[in-house]
Amino acid sequence: MHRTSTAEGRRRPSPLTLSRPVSWFLLAFGVWSWFVWITFVKNLFKDGSGLAFDDAGDPTGYFWVHLVLAITSFLLGTAIGVIGLRGLRALRGARGDDTESDPGSGTRAG
């Protein structure tokens, strides 16, 4: 890994650039995660089978475990989607920088 030096002489890693396909995959995974887990939670609240709620209408252990699972997966999917979005923005910014620095490239920035 390429490293750069700081003023104090310590080395720090250079920033990572994601490829376009990887960035799109991460963003798609984040969107998929929102769709799947929000749908799951809606269905969990509407459950009439007796798994999520007991006879008195109180939530069961099944309900709480699956709600925590869904929330955790939703948050991780959101974080992964944000990483993908930031990767795409970084690539777009790098592409814009390349075309602006070469006025004879025949393409317009932006």
Image: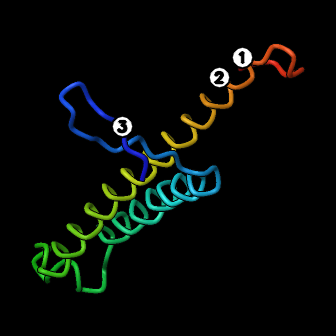
Tell me which corner region of the image, top left, top right, bottom left or bottom right, holds residue 34: bottom left
> Disc 2 or disc 3, which is closer to the eye?
3
Q: Residue at left 38%, top 70%?
A: 43
Disc sitting over residue 4 in the figure: 3
Measured as percent of width and height from the top left, residue 63 is found at: 20, 75
Q: Is 12 drawn above or below residue 99 in the view shown?
A: below
- The residue pinned by badge 1 equals 100
| Type of the residue with mark 2 | Asp
Q: Nearer the viewer, residue 59 or 64?
A: 64
Measured as percent of width and height from the top left, residue 33 is found at: 44, 61
Query: Disc 3 on helix, strand or loop?
Result: strand
- The residue pinned by badge 2 equals 97
Query: For the residue carrying disc 3, how many other residues have a C-alpha within 10 Å: few (<14), some (14-19), or many (20+)?
Result: few
Q: Is 23 drawn above or below residue 101 in the view shown?
A: below
> In whole angstroms, how far apart are the C-alphas of marks 2 and 3?
21 Å
Q: Residue at left 23%, top 86%?
A: 50
